[in-house]
């Protein structure tokens, strides 16, 4: 059995999740969560000490975590965004956004609490600038990220032996951002956005802080860009 700490990362097949996996691979054994089995296989082949964890997060059960008895790091990176003004956003969009961005996070954390407690583990939640400020056409997404912020704050108080860190990145150069720009009807320019590796380095900073420092929140923005 490896003596290295273990990290489970959701949304690990691409984007921020994949960047975090690559940043942690030198020091952690990895469980890579995601729905794209082919992409996960590619990540596993790239990263020694990584295993796929192909689970549908909205339907996770105790059986899915039964083999995880100790977990040092849980990174919630998976999420969805659908833009639209309130008058354009039907209930099914609200339900799907909340289900993936909030309910799935809460349930997976709940199921993994025994393993996290055993390791005095660290929970990292990739939030968004929208978790600090709501903008027009972003209301359903922002509401889910505000809820995720409240979840992190409450978890931190309920589980004082765990560390809980929320990361609030601005716009990141990912496939999701490309889709967002398409929804906004504007061009996608990678240089306008944060690099996913920059977010991963911030996560690594939180995880490697000295034992007397509990980093609760970090905000990171593209240089020279507004907060959203």
Image: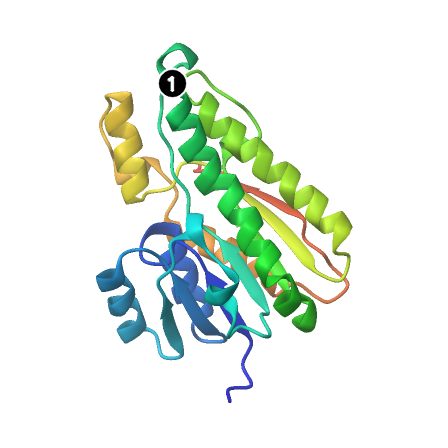
| Image spot of residue 69 (x, y percent) | 58, 75
Residue at the image point whose x is 38% and y is 38% from the top: 80
Using the image as rendered, state which of residue 122 and residue 147 is in the foreground. Answer: 147
Q: How is the image coloured?
A: rainbow
Residue at the image point whose x is 26% and y is 36% from the top: 178
Q: On the rendered structure, is 119 left or right of 204?
A: right
Q: Secondary structure at mark 1?
A: loop
Which of the 4 image quadrants contains residue 34? bottom left
Residue at the image point whose x is 57% and y is 47% from the top: 106
Q: Which residue is mark 1?
A: 89
| Image spot of residue 59 (x, y percent) | 43, 51
- In the displayed structure, 202 sits above or below 174; it is below
Q: On the rendered structure, is 171 left or right of 106?
A: left
- In the displayed structure, 144 sits above or below 51; it is above
Q: Residue furthest bottom?
A: 1
| Image spot of residue 145 (x, y percent) | 53, 34
Residue at the image point whose x is 64% and y is 66% from the top: 116
Q: Residue furthest top?
A: 87
Q: Would you say residue 186 is visible in this rendering?
A: yes
């Amino acid at each position: 059995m490896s003596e290295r700490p273990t990290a489970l990362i959701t949304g690990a097949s691409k984007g921020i999740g994949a960047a975090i996996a690559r940043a942690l691979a030198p020091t952690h054994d990895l469980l890579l969560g995601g729905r794209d089995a082919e992409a996960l296989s590619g990540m596993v082949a790239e990263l020694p000490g990584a295993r796929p964890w192909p689970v549908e997060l909205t339907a996770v059960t105790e059986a899915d975590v039964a083999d995880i008895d100790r977990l040092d790091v849980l990174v919630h990176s998976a999420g969805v965004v659908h833009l639209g003004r309130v008058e354009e956003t039907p209930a099914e969009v609200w339900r799907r956004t909340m289900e993936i961005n909030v309910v799935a996070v809460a349930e997976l954390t709940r199921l993994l609490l025994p393993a996290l407690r055993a390791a005095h583990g660290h929970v990292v939640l990739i939030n968004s600038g929208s978790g600090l400020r709501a903008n027009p056409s972003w209301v359903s997404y922002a509401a889910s990220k505000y809820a995720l912020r409240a979840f992190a704050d409450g978890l931190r108080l309920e589980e004082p032996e765990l560390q809980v860190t929320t990361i609030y990145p601005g716009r990141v150069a990912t496939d999701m951002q490309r889709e967002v720009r398409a929804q906004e009807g504007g061009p996608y320019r990678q240089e306008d956005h944060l690099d996913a590796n920059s977010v991963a380095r911030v996560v690594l900073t939180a995880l490697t802080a000295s034992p007397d420092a509990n980093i609760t929140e970090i905000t990171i923005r593209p240089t020279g860009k507004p907060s959203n």
